[in-house]
Image (cartoon, rainbow, N blue to C red):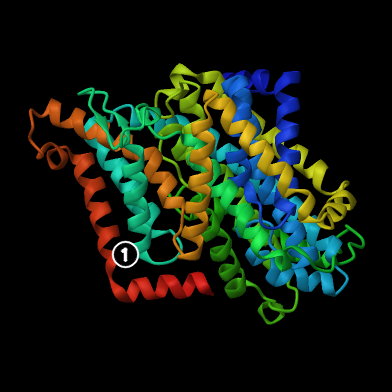
Amino acid sequence: MIENLALGLSVAMTFHNLGFAFIGCMIGTAIGVLPGIGPLATIALLLPLTFALDPITALIMLSGIYYGAQYGGSTSAILLNLPGEVTAVVTTLEGHKMAKRGRAGAALATAAIGSFFAGTVATLVVAASGPLLTNLALSFGPAEYFSLILLGLIIATVLAQGSVFKSIAMLVLGVALGLVGTDVQSGQVRFSFGFFELFEGIDFVAVAMGIFGVAEIIRNLENPENRSGTVAKVGSLMLTKEEFKRATPSVIRGTIVGSILGILPGGGLALSTFASYMLERKVSKYGHEFGTGAIEGVAGPESANNAASQTSFIPMLTLGIPANAVMALMIGGLMIHGIQPGPGVIQAQPALFWGLIASMWIGNLMLLVINLPLIGMWVSLLRLPYKYLYPAILVFCAIGVYSVNYSPFNVFETVLFGFLGYLFFKLALEPAPLLIGFVLGPMLEEYLRRAMVVSRGSALVFVERPVSAVLLAIAALALGAMLLPSIRRRKDEALEE
């Protein structure tokens, strides 16, 4: 373990990788601060830039954007009562109330310190559990991988927001889009409708940029009132002795909750913040203060969302299964570089795995430095009119997607998926299952074929192998629970609450 961490530090501490880690953390914090953009859209827009980078450097920068956004989202939530990121929704409940009482600085400091502690602990969890899960996954055959991917798809649907049946429809659509192009086994072209540009499949960057980037811009332009408000005064960043005493156990509990729930495919990141907030309300001695600015309501959820953002890398790196849509983007970016995430990564690319682990801790330290001393800059950024941002974003988006294959067709694809993403929003269709299905669909087909070849066409191979049978049983139970009306109603009510 010590040798591996030393390898990771030697990779992450190079001037080149430190620079891109800092850039990622700065961009992540900025888009977390700005309400309505989010890490998903930003990573989708910046994905083409990573093609010219080394895969390790690209992953370090994109990771910095991801967990940097979790830090930055709390700033607008506390000062403006607008969550810059979905995981910061809970922070508005108590954080903005603290700001109204003149304790905005204490709330921001609590969020930053709690996030640093949680990120550090979660990084150790990733470092310890990664090799263990990898050794387990190396014993998997095609049948086990098929069952595991199927379980991941079902759980992603179970934990997605909104209607269960709409989530299933989006997942199936994503799988179908992932199967467009030339079949590797037979050489037959599928679902191309005569467009030779689709012979190699639908471009991943076009799908991600369109559905999450362009669609997000259209939504923000439609609702400009959601991007303005009065910024609260920051005040002193120092916590009183009583506040520190109350926040400490909440930070620890939030770290534990986030580290566990972040591994879950689907909505583990958002789920961790809500679960932490509800836990704090139940166990806190100051439960009567919730709703008026209880510091536990900031410390717990902020720690949980940062811990969850770190541990969500575990299934992506060790099993090749994305825990959320951002991880699906990460997988797509690695595959473009010719790297297949999964159990072989640690052995085939040890510098990538351990370099990322080391960069997570370095990135958390950078974010602690970035967030507190530069709080004045983030306050100024909150006052920046969106009308100056979106034209530059759109131009950058068009240039980026064109540069992937130097094809105008990819630009048209992006525009099409942008309007589709906006239509999904209007129809209350969650797009995250689509992207997860798009990434995992071809993998599901590949392992299904391999398993059937090994078993000479017998489908019993999926239940004859114990691990595969257990995974399928869990998938069946999850699917059955999801389709029960009473459980579905409770899920929707919990999400609305």
- 417 or 283: which is nearer to us? 417
Is any part of residue 368 visible from this angle? yes
| Picture quarter with the C terminus | bottom right
Q: Which residue occupies the extreme right position in the image?
A: 235
> Label 1 sits on what residue type?
Met
Residue that mark 1 sits on? 482
Q: Position of residue 437 (x, y in %)?
A: 37, 45
Image coordinates of residue 116 in percent, x first then y, are 71, 46
Q: Residue furthest front?
A: 194
In the image shown, does 432 or 424 lie closer to the viewer?
424
**Residue 98 in the figure: left or right of residue 308:** right
Residue at figure coordinates x 73%, y 68% from the top left: 225
- Camera-side residue of 15 and 259: 15
Most foreground residue, 195 or 158:
195
Left or right of residue 127, residue 175 in this image: left
Relative to 75, say whether 50 is above or below: above
Q: Secondary structure at mark 1?
A: helix
